[in-house]
Structure formats: structure tokens, C-alpha cells
Image: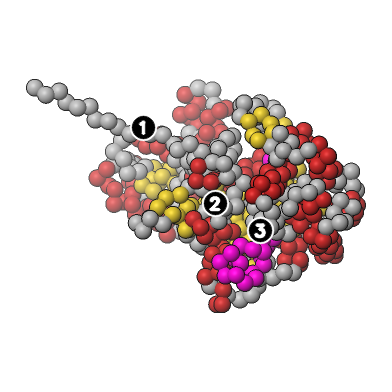
Amino acid sequence: MAKKTKQKRPAARLPKGMRDIGPAEIRAMNAMIATIRDVYESYGFEPLETPAFEYTDALGKFLPDTDRPNEGVFSFQDEDDQWLSLRYDQTAPLARYVAQNFDMLPKPFRRYAVGPVWRNEKPGPGRFRQFMQFDADTVATTSVAADAEMCMLAADTMEALGIARGQYQVRVNSRKVLDGVLEGIGIDPSFSTGTEQQVRTRLTVLRAIDKLDRLGMEGVSALLGPGRKDESGDYTKGAGLDPQQIDKLMTFISAGLAANSAQQTLNSIQALVENSETGRQGIEELMEMQTLLESTGYTNKRVLMDPTIVRGLDYYTGPVFEAELTFEVKDDKGQPVRFGSVGGGGRYDDLVTRFTGRPAPATGFSIGVSRLQSALQALGRQNTNVGLGTVVVLVMDFNERPRYLTMVNALRSAGIRAEMYLGTSGMKAQMKYADKRGAPCVIIQGEDELANGQVQIKDLIEGAKAAQSIKDNKEWKSTRPAQFAVESEKLVEAVTSVLARHSPQVKN
């Protein structure tokens, strides 16, 4: 007799760099997104949704992590052998959309978008290959006021989410100023006129400075030179600059650290770019932004000029900015943790031009939703109980399910999330089910309750609190904590009262 071949089963495993998200976190995220949306819409931005993937050449090669397979993106070929890639941000798809619909759009064109993006990067603690971004962009304007407005938008969003002034800062710099500094040390900052080696060096320099918050001055200096080895032993090749070039760049990076005002910061930087027309233009734009921001109350406590801000993406051409959280919290081991940047953006004047050949200057700001949500939870500004489960109607007699469904429908009609237990187990298992579902209360109607025209409501949240103080089973039975009877017609009213007692309130 032939031996049976053992069936090979797939392993239940999560792809590397991905994560599952449960109902409580999803509801908390949705509440946060609703707040962000309200701020964006108050500025006049309109929603737009683009596909999850685009033709790879349309997305362009702007990611900072280009030494990985597929150059930082997840790609595949369609039936026509054309390459498609999952979007790595919300901005590149916007550029394609604007180019495709340019003549029909109002100009400036203002839109917001929220959704997942994907990056084929090395995953690590808190760094995932799929994450959520919430963007706002203004396209078809050269006005520096549009850049200043993005900084205002970032500050207003932080405060709308309950992050107080002093706990965040929007930091501003300019790629033009950076390019002026590079010119001063003999590196052509242009993608179009620089040699291949100069372009590569420029990108390595920008990415090194962008890692200042994580690596510190010493780490950045190493990356500007020969390179550095990280804690895991991985070696990252540096820009190969000489000591004099490194010294000038480190002087630029530290220019704002000793300054007491935006004007002092700009004055310190100005001396480093006085021989560069591009650099001088960048300083002038930052000064104009500073005037606009201060005139509307967005002073250093909210928006600050900072020469260390670079942004990793290669398509930025002017002012760049980051929303950074400045408070510290303790991790599970009692160690201090800073969340740092939770959003950023800047001016990108050439993305749409790639498609059309005609000018379409633009600026935008993007929030990293998951990172910001973690920060809000750490601050206590986001309620972790947003995901209270549904009210569960227990089934005491499986032949009477129509009666129990009638109760469920009455609750649902009143806007209450409710469900009838759909399994086949008894009372004890049904209660365990309700606990696992996070139900705030359960509804019980057996023969006795039915005969008396009543239902029993068991408040599971209050019951759990009471259980901690009750000493023995006899006391439990005598007190029947958090369980009460009401007339059947008052079911909705009684459940509404229980839910109101436990309605989550976001702390301010």
C-alpha cells in the first residue's frame, strides 16, 4: 500500500518589516486622522486618492536608500512587461496626477491625501516597510508664503492633537543654502551639470547630515569622511571628503546651535554662502519666511530656523522643514526615549516638470501617522480605550435566537454597536468571548427574566474593578457587582447609560 504523502502546510508568518494592527489601535488612528483632516481642510486643502502603485519611471528614483534591491521600492512587471512599483510616498503620485490633469486643475492646486506607503528598506525597531502618511501639498506657485503656510499647518496640527507648545518644534532649512555650502567646498550641487561622482558625493553628504539626530556630530563626521561601522558591524561607505571640507560642513551644521534667534542663525549661515548665488537666494527665502511666520505669531517656540534639517528625499529644491517632538518619555526599561521627527516636507519645483517640461513649482508637508500615534499615546493625549468592543447579547436558549436578534437590532437602531453571540457554547464560554471582545457589557435574558419582562445587564468594566476588591466567592454571589435588571423596554436606555459611564475622554 502506497504511503500517504504528508501535506505541506504554509507557515503562518508575518513578512519581515510588516506588522498587524488590531482594532483598538485602528480606532485610535482613525480618531487622530479625523483631527488632522479637520486642520488640513480648515486651510482649504481638498482630498485626493491615487493608486497604491504607479509605473516605476513615473515614481522616479529619489529615495535615500538606493543601495538595496529595487532601489528602495517594491516592484513587479505587468502583463505588458512594464515595471510597476508600490508608492514610496504620496508626493510622487501627486506629481503624475498634476501632470496628467494640469490644464483642468485650479492653480495653485491644493490637495491632501492619506494612505499607506511602502519602502524596500532594512527594517528595524519601529521602522516598518509599510506605514501610513498624511500629506498636504500646494502645486503651481513659487510664493514663499506657501512654504511658510506649510510650517504653520504643521504647528497647528501638532496643537490640535494635544501636543503643547514647548513639546514640539517645526524646524526649517533650505536645500539652496545647503547647495551654496557645497559649492563653497568644491562640490557641484546640480544633478544636471555635476559629474556622476559629484552627484553621488552630494547625495552621500545630504544623507549623512540627515542622520545627525540619530548618529550625532561624530557619526555624521565619519560619514562625510571614509565611512562608519554601526553597532551590528555593518559598514556604510562615506562621502570621502577631505578634513578641510568636513570642517566647513560641520561648521555649517553647528551654526544654529549657539544662536538665540532665527536672525542670528541666518546671519551665521549667510557668511558661509556669500560667494554662492544659490546660497544667497536660499537665505533670502528663509528670511522672507521668517518675517511671514513671526507676523502671524509663529515664533521660535513653534517654528525655528535650523541648518541641520536636510530631509532624505532627493527631489527637494528649496525650503525644507520637519515637525519634531521635543519631550522625553521612559520606555519599559525606564530609559529616556525621544520620538524626534514625526513629519516633514519642503519645496519640490521639478517633480511635475519631469513629465511636462513646463514649470509647476510645489511645496508640501507629510505626517508619519504611526510614529505620531505612538507619541500621542506616550504623552497620554490619545485614549487607548477607543477600541471598546461591542455590546454582546448572550444566548441562553438557542431556540430563541429571533428574540435575541430583536434586542440586537433595537440597540443597533439606537446607534449602539451590538452583536448576538453566534457560537454554540454555553454561558461560561460566552462570557469569556465577551471579555476577549472587550465588551463593555453583556445582555442576559433567561426564562426568569423573560417571565418578569426584564433583562439583566452586566457591566463588565465595573465588574472587573469590583472583582479586585471582593475577597471570596460568597461575597461575590451576595453582592452581584455591576449587574442589574431593567424592564425589557428600557434596554436601550440602560445600555446607553452604561456606555456613557465608560465613554473614553481624550486628555487635554
x 62%, y 72%: residue: 358
Type of amino acid under label 2: Tyr
**Residue 330 occupies which quadrant of the picture?**
top right
x 64%, y 56%: residue: 315
Looking at the rendering, the stretch of residues picked out in magenta corresponds to 338-364
Q: Please identify the residue farthest to the left as the structure is shown.
A: 1
- The answer to whether 359 is drawn above or below residue 246 in the figure is below
**Mark 2 — residue?**
88
**Residue 266 occupies which quadrant of the picture?**
bottom right
Residue 288 x %, y %: 83, 64
Residue 258 x %, y %: 89, 43
Type of amino acid under label 1: Ala
**Mark 1 — residue?**
11
In the picture, the quarter occupied by the N terminus is top left
In-front residue for pair 476/222: 222
**Mark 3 — residue?**
192
Q: Is residue 22 left or right of residue 297?
A: left
Residue 256 x %, y %: 85, 47
Residue 284 x %, y %: 84, 62
Q: Decide: marks 2, 1 in contact (CB < 8 A)?
A: no
Q: Decide: marks 3, 1 in contact (CB < 8 A)?
A: no
